[in-house]
């Protein structure tokens, strides 16, 4: 792309002359190097930049960018705006409303953003350029969303080769994409962080719990990496042969703990085949795991590039044992022709999976370091080489600085895929890394959540190139997350890494603070909310992929796990709702994850009252009550696990008479009306009916029910149905109060009969049962209808079975 800039875009020639009106100053560092410093403490500086162009084509920007001498930045800006506008759902409304009319896009704000080098006092670096844009309807100068901030924003990061004089003068934050991630300098940073952690922190002590043996805790097999003059060799080893100080592997133990020092890996499997350990090659893998094909004709698969890169990283860090599930757990054999043998082999892998997956939590908890491949979709992709930027996506900015003839050179400007909030991108490289992490595809996978939460020491590879090899995190290294003032934290729920799991087993967190059960339950609900936003390839993995955290929490809570919920906190746990149902305005702040309506898989997975029975996003709404008090008594439950020894894993498909929780609760009958209620969100209420979000978009249905009162009159109430399927007209349903708050709602006289907030379930009676048995079909909440609570005043609790 052209390196020319039009007059308007020449603001990218950053110099003391051009930027001094905004408070930038030249400073001389201790090493005598001159640099241009951002005004003290400022994260971003706005510069004037007028730009308006017509949708859908942006002809003015196109004209400015055209030809070999056209403006390179105008071209980047045009591409990014077009992409950003296409992505932002906000404009569906504007476009629908103004079909056929011409919309304009306006650059509302152009800012230069700083990052500050933590190691280098307050030295600022030039990190990015942020463009905030609005779409204007005909005849308007301001966006209709003016009060909620810009309609969208696009970022451009600034990168450079580290030895370029101009880049050093500005302190360009990002390395040029051609610079290798695993440089000696980058590896040393991580080695030092690990050493520091070994020496200074207490959390690395081995998490062995009472009654647990090494073999309960460690994976059965590890990959051993050896290096000598003939090169590198990998093979599987049994952990029971390691770790004994008397044997040859004793030196692989973590100092002073007797624990084996290994790296665990978290990555996405993807959809393509790659080398795994199966019953057929298990023996061979104990001898050798092929690093590359032995000859060009050799078609046997070799170690995929992503794993090879991890081996490189392990060697640089001096850790020579590695756990990768696909190689250390025996995978399902598919290629054996002999049917009898195939059956035996498949049973072997099934049993191995059952054994190893049951200790998955401790495999990650016991790792010396967990490496996370967050930037790739499959291990077939490498993680150390950055993809070469396409020539269309990078523009070189070259100039010399006035009065300093030797300060001349180039930096580069490149679009960033990130579109979140301004402050969090670069104001702290660690926050930027966390943002990148949270929005990565890796972070959309079900299994990766517990891998992330249970690993004590984590290295997220390549998560932001500002941080070299990757983001390092351990419970006592607080570069990101906890040491940043709350008010500046993103509004959406983040910092999963700091939630109360794993280290909480001993009852205290790393800083010695005691975890209350209340905190642990709350952490659990936040974890589940995040988990239900994730995808699983295998539907039956719903419970197993969270079982490691569940097991850990169960120990800490000393409570019984009931399919994704806790027996002693069921009055909060049952109160889940499809996400955004109760708080529809909040979806703007929950990141870019696609909204998924709730659906129930064809095959039985869990009882209807458990969120595990459904796929799609949920949230727990019990906290909307003020000091909620349980209105139910748990009398018992029966849930039959698929594997006898694992109450945290999947349930048996055929539960027989089981699969229930028995409660003493108040239940009243109600009549469900056919008509949909409009969504109770003022943003949408103003829209004409045909533009209202439909149930299939929101994933739930708002309906009214009629409840007959003792006086003979009927009271109507609003309820939420979990699924947007079809329901018969005037169906008989039941309402069950689960929790009530201790405070009246708004004191508007006459508006609410009782005014006490409560929340509970909407149930459907199971036909042909001698006992009172229900399944859940929805939830009611005080949120829209406080009057419901009083309906339960004259109701006697009775024993009910929820299935
Ligand atoms: Zn331009
Ligand atoms: Zn540490």
Image: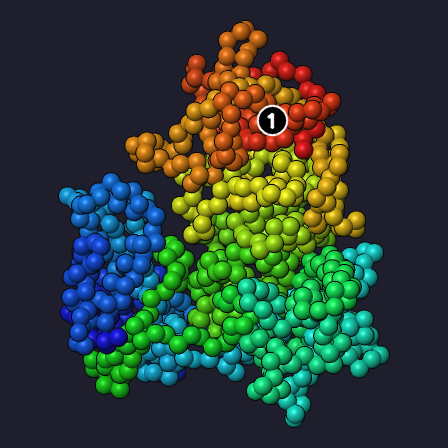
- The residue positioned 18% from the left and 45% from the top of the image is 101
Q: Quadrant of the N terminus?
A: bottom left
Image quadrant of residue 246? bottom right
Q: Give the vertical position of 601 relative to 439 (above or below).
A: above
| Residue at x-position 24% and y-position 63% | 78
Where residue 41 sits in the image (x, y, percent)?
Answer: 36, 62
Task: Name which residue lies at 58% across and 55% down.
Answer: 537
Circle 1 Cα neighbour tier, 10 Å, few/some/many (<14 / 14–19 / ≥20): some
x and y, in percent, of residue 61 in the image? 19, 63
- The outermost residue toward the top is 711
- The residue furthest bottom is 229
Name the spot of residue 309 as percent of width and height, x first: 56, 77
For the C terminus, the quadrant is: top right
- Residue at the far front in the pictured view: 338
Question: Would residue 252 be found to the left or right of residue 521 on screen?
Answer: right
In the image, is residue 396 above or below residue 723? Answer: below
Q: At which x and y percent is residue 229?
A: 65, 93
Residue 533 visible within the image: yes
Residue nearest the viewer, comparing 158 with 139: 139
In the picture of the structure, the residue carrying the numbered disc 1 is 764
Nearest the viewer among 407 and 528 is 528
Q: Is residue 399 above or below residue 774?
A: below
Q: Quadrant of residue 766?
A: top right
Q: Is residue 508 visible?
A: no
């Amino acid at each position: 792309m052209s390196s020319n800039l039009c007059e308007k875009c020449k603001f990218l020639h950053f110099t003391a002359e051009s930027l001094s009106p905004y408070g930038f100053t030249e400073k001389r560092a201790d090493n005598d190097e001159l640099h241009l410093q951002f005004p003290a403490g400022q994260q971003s500086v706005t510069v004037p930049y007028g730009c308006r162009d017509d949708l859908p084509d942006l002809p003015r920007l196109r004209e400015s960018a055209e030809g070999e001498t056209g403006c390179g930045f105008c071209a980047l800006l045009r591409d990014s705006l077009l992409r950003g506008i296409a992505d932002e759902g906000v404009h569906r409304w504007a476009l629908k409303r103004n079909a056929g009319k011409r919309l304009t896009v306006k650059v509302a704000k152009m800012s230069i953003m700083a990052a500050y080098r933590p190691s280098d006092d307050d030295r600022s670096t030039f990190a990015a350029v942020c463009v905030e844009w609005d779409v204007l309807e005909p005849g308007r100068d301001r966006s209709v969303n003016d009060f909620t901030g810009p309609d969208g924003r696009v970022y451009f990061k600034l990168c450079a080769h580290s030895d370029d004089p101009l880049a050093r003068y500005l302190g360009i934050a990002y390395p040029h994409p051609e610079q290798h991630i695993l440089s000696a300098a980058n590896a040393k940073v991580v080695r030092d962080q690990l050493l520091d952690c070994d020496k200074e922190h207490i959390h690395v002590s081995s998490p062995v719990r009472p009654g647990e043996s090494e073999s309960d805790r460690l994976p059965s097999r590890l990959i051993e990496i050896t290096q000598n003059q003939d090169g590198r060799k990998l093979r599987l080893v049994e952990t029971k042969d390691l770790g004994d100080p008397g044997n040859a592997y004793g030196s692989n133990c973590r100092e002073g703990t007797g624990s084996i020092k290994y790296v665990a890996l978290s990555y996405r499997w993807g959809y393509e085949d790659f080398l795994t350990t199966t019953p057929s090659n298990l023996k061979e893998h104990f001898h050798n795991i092929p690093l590359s094909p032995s000859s060009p004709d050799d078609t046997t698969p070799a170690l995929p590039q992503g794993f090879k890169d991890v081996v490189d990283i392990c060697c640089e860090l001096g850790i020579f044992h590695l756990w990768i599930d696909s190689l250390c757990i025996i995978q399902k054999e598919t290629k054996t022709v002999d049917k009898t043998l195939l059956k035996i082999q498949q049973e072997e892998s099934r049993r191995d999976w059952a054994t190893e997956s049951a200790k998955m939590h401790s495999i990650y908890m016991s790792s010396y370091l967990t490496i996370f491949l967050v930037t790739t979709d499959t291990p077939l992709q490498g993680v150390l080489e950055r993809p070469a930027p396409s020539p269309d996506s990078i523009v070189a900015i070259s100039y010399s600085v006035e009065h300093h003839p030797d300060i001349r050179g180039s930096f580069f400007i490149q679009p960033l895929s990130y579109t979140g909030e301004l402050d969090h991108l670069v104001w702290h490289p660690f926050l930027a890394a966390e943002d990148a992490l949270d929005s990565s595809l890796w972070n959309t996978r079900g299994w990766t959540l517990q891998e992330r939460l249970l690993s004590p020491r984590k290295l997220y590879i390549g998560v932001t190139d500002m941080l070299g090899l990757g983001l390092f995190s351990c419970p006592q290294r607080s570069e990101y997350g906890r040491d940043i003032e709350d008010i500046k934290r993103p509004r959406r729920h983040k910092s999963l890494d700091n939630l109360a799991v794993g280290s909480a087993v001993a009852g205290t967190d790393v800083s010695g603070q005691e975890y209350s059960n209340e905190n642990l339950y709350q952490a659990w609900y936040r974890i589940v909310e995040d988990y239900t936003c994730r995808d699983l390839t295998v539907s039956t993995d719903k419970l197993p992929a969270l079982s490691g955290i569940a097991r850990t929490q169960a120990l800490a809570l000393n409570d019984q796990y009931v399919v994704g919920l806790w027996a002693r906190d069921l009055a909060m746990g049952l109160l889940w709702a499809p996400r955004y149902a109760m708080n529809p305005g909040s979806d703007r702040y929950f990141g870019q994850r696609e909204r998924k309506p709730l659906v129930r898989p064809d095959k039985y997975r869990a009882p209807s009252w458990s969120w595990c029975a459904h796929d799609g996003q949920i949230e727990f709404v019990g906290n909307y009550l003020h000091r909620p008090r349980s209105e139910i008594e748990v009398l018992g439950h029966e849930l039959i696990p698929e594997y006898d020894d694992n109450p945290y894993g999947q349930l048996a498909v055929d539960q027989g008479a089981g699969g229930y929780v028995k409660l003493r609760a108040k239940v009243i009958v109600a009549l469900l009306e056919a008509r949909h209620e409009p969504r109770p969100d003022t943003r949408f209420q103003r829209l004409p009916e045909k533009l209202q979000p439909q149930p299939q978009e929101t994933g739930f249905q708002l309906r009214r029910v009629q409840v007959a009162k003792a006086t003979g009159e009927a009271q109507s109430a609003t309820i939420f149905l979990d699924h947007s399927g079809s329901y018969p007209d005037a169906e008989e349903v039941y309402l069950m109060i689960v929790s009530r708050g201790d405070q009246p709602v708004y004191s508007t006289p006459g508006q609410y009969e009782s005014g006490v907030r409560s929340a509970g379930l909407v149930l459907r009676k199971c036909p042909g049962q001698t006992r009172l048995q229900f399944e859940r079909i929805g939830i009611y909440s005080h949120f829209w209808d406080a009057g419901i609570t009083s309906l339960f005043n004259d109701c006697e609790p009775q024993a009910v079975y929820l299935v």
